[in-house]
Amino acid sequence: MKDVAKDTILVHAGRDPKNNHGIVNPPVYHCSTVLFPTLDALEDSDRRPFEVINYGRVGTPTTFAFEKAVAELEGGFGAVNTGSGLSAISIALSAVTKAGDHVLITDSAYGPTRRFANETLKGYGVEVEFFDPNIGAGIAALLRPNTCAVFLESPGSLTFEIQDVPAIAAAAKTVGAVVMIDNTWATPLFFRPFDHGVDLSIHAATKYMVGHADAMLGAIVCRDEALWTTVKKTATRFGVCAGPDDLFLGLRGLRSMAVRLKQHQESALILADWLAARPDITRVLHPARPDFPGHALWKRDFTGSSGLFSALLTPVPRAALAAFFDGLELFGIGYSWGGFESLILPARPAGVRTATRWDEPGHLLRFHAGLEHPDDLIRDLDAAFRRLNAAL
Ligand SMILES: *Cc1c(COP(=O)(O)O)cnc(C)c1O
């Protein structure tokens, strides 16, 4: 689809009613074995492994519908599906690294990304180095002839640092490193990685794409055909693929993602403003707020913000923190985010930092603004702060 808005792509991408009895949604293929009518057909499929449907693991029309939709949305050559966001990250990193290579990873990366790099990539003989997310063009000093990949995540997990993606990507190109970004927070709607020099855009589709907290799904969108072939081969070698019902939930989630994100965005900003005005909150970490250090970069490169942000609570004893959490009625306490429901999580960035330090006093709380009415969410939080203060 040419010259249409992302909202329109979301509604139409990956669907083909004309070739599907007029039915709006593509069917869900449950598949392992694919039968071939003749020996010739079987041998032909071996020669063209990614063109002919030959086995469930390599892909079905359900897989291709999801991959096509996500690739079209992001504006890449193609996408590769995986069974979770983390497997999309591990496959992308594995696809472009080999023993003896050097990989640079932002210090603000999602914790399990760091663990995969430290515990698995290192074990395979890859040198892993973390860098300050605010490094910008200064990354040039860390690049080596064997730097094969630069891994970005912007905003960063838990602390939301905005990275100067074009500056980092331009420097990475001088040594031929593949630039990859975890674009889960922004979704393809609010940040366009390929316009900023990125080669691989990675999504935990589990979050806003699925959008209903009921499936695990990942996608790696590749800028060009050569990278797509490399990533697809790697995913196939590892035997990574998502189940058909989860792919269907990913496709279904995409249809309403733009309208959901409008509300997540609006409600998160309302909550962030309300929190920022409270005496027991020392700082709100939300890139769309003018008081956030990365705000200017966010404004330059992003077209919106989603529902996830953090706020720093003044230091309080654990019992008071527990009083805050334990009586919550609407906010859930739990991992992940991107579903229709609001969540709060105590975050501990200090434990997942090595190139930089996080030594702010107090408790960092990560909020996900769900689709409940913001007035009700504020009432739930207000009651939580009352319990906290009563426990001091
Ligand atoms: C949740 C998350 C992931 C991992 O996705 P899963 O589907 O849970 O494996 C990766 N990156 C970011 C930024 C995330 O928030």
Image: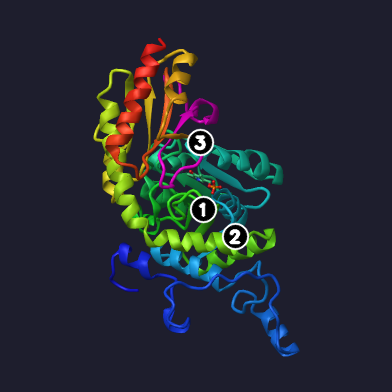
Q: Specify whether residue 244 is in view.
A: yes
- Camera-near label (2 vs 3) is 3
Q: In front here: 322 or 126? A: 322
Q: Secondary structure at mark 2?
A: loop
The mark that comes first in sequence, 1 or 2, is 1
- Camera-near label (3 vs 1) is 3
Ligand 1: does it lie within 8 Å of the C-beta at label 1? no
Q: Residue at x 44, y 41 (%)?
A: 139
The mark that comes first in sequence, 3 or 1, is 1
Q: Which residue is mark 1?
A: 177
Compute the Cα span from label 1 to label 2: 28 Å
Q: Are marks 3 and 1 in contact (CB under 8 Å)?
A: no
Q: Amino acid at mark 2?
A: Ala
Magenta range is 334-360
Percent x, y of residue 94? 62, 53
Percent x, y of residue 128? 60, 40
Q: Amino acid at mark 3?
A: Gly
Q: Residue at x 34, y 51 (%)?
A: 261
Instruction: Specify the label residue 334 is tagged with.
Output: 3
Q: In front here: 158 or 343? A: 343
Q: Amino acid at mark 1?
A: Ala
Magenta-drawn stretch contains 227: no
